[in-house]
Image (cartoon, rainbow, N blue to C red):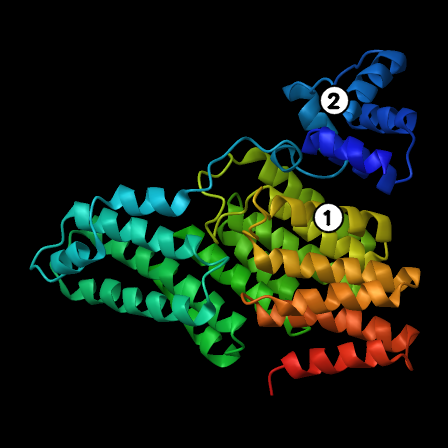
Amino acid sequence: MADVAADLDRPAWASRLRAERTARGWSQGEAVRAMRVHASEQLPADSTLLRNWKRWEAGSSEPDSFYRSLIAKTFGTVTAAFFPPAVRHDADTELIAGTGMETVEILARLRTSDVSNATLEALRITADRLCSEYPYMSSDQLRVEGRAWLRRITALMDRRLTLAQHQEVLTLAGWVALLVGCVEYDMGLRRIAEGTRKAALTLGEEAGNTAVSGWAYEMRAWYALTQGDYRGVIAAAEAGESIAANSSAAVQLAGQRAKAWARLGDRRQVEMALDKGRTLLESLPYPENTDHHFVVDPAKFDFYAMDCYRLAGEDRLAEMYAAEVIRSSTDPDGTERKPMRIAEARVTLGVVAARSGDLELAVAHGRRALDGDRKSLPSLLMCSRELATLMRERYPNEPEALSYLDEVRTLSPR
């Protein structure tokens, strides 16, 4: 109880510092020595570092920028995931206000003979708004809205456009097509989603926009992962990285590659892929809008690591990262801002509980993961089946385990 109360009093980064250390079974002295290994320049004596570490864990002092980066590197994550900057979560309001136009006015301008740059800017912000609503808007509604705006945007191709405007329209259509393809795949519309993804890839190539093309390959990697084609994930990641090597899409491709290698049982390749993604993400600026689906916010790196450590059987690390994913995906008022990440984190907690012999807790976590309204069906099923397989192996005759297996089967597309 005392530890729980202390965690409530400490800043989130201080609590995480302790959780990361204990998940690895390190003493504070061992953590200091590990930090020294990852330092690129000479550090003070261990006694000084140990005093600093104790203050950091207590939350009585905060590491400076040098030590923040070093701590993140020591634990294999990115600085902004460990020490996130203060951001406002009113992105939707800002996007709508930023257009300077209501939807009716945008549509009226689209009917005119010419397309002004102001109209294109309004469409750009509208596309960003749609991509930012992905985490929590219902799949049906988002697909309807996305397809409607995609038709409006592509209709502009028949209008009088400058070369720059033509490329902008292709790019906007590419982003919205990517979004629609993601939502369709979430809904289990596999064949339709693949057609939409290919259309987005073509739009990106025609626009000369490597970001759109990179994310189209990332979607291919995601589709392959959830279909059990792990070599296909690696091939898609290599193709995408060759096009968009220094983008956020490449970070996510590294994450998908790590997940694939985890399922193939190659721990060395997992660590290499995670380190590649971490290094690239560390070099990118902190995103202005962390809700945008085609932006990798630093907190998502914990999500990748959670999945890999669960597959590797590193239960303490998987549990720690799952707790961090839930914390970073939930607003202070309890609103689940990223419910799909939270669902997979709960499956991870279920796997850890099942391995520790607590079937009741494992089922509770597993069922809670299935309850959410906003689901990425293929990804949730992939993880839930891993939990279901574990239960079938360890608790073959337990009624609660059998009941959970039936619930997972019911969720599966026919």
Asked if residue 279 lies left or right of residue 208, the reply is: right
Asked if residue 191 lies left or right of residue 324, the reply is: left
| Disc 2 secondary structure class | loop
Q: Nearer the viewer, mark 2 or mark 1?
A: 1
| Residue drawn 71% across the image and 79% down it | 407
Q: In the image, residue 152 lies at what x, y percent?
A: 23, 65
Viewer-side residue, 318 vs 15: 15
Viewer-side residue, 287 vs 104: 104
Q: Which residue is mark 1?
A: 323
Mark nearer the N terminus (2 vs 1): 2
| Residue drawn 83% across the image and 57% down it | 312
Q: Where residue 40 is drawn, which disc sits there? A: 2
**Residue 208 at least partly seen:** no
Q: Quadrant of the N terminus?
A: top right
Q: In the image, residue 115 lies at what x, y percent?
A: 13, 54
Answer above or below: position of 204 versus 188: above
Q: Amino acid at mark 1?
A: Ala
Answer above or below: position of 9 versus 4: above
Asked if residue 185 lies left or right of residue 412, the reply is: left
Alpha carbon separation for disc pair 2 and 1 = 30 Å
Answer above or below: position of 291 versus 136: above
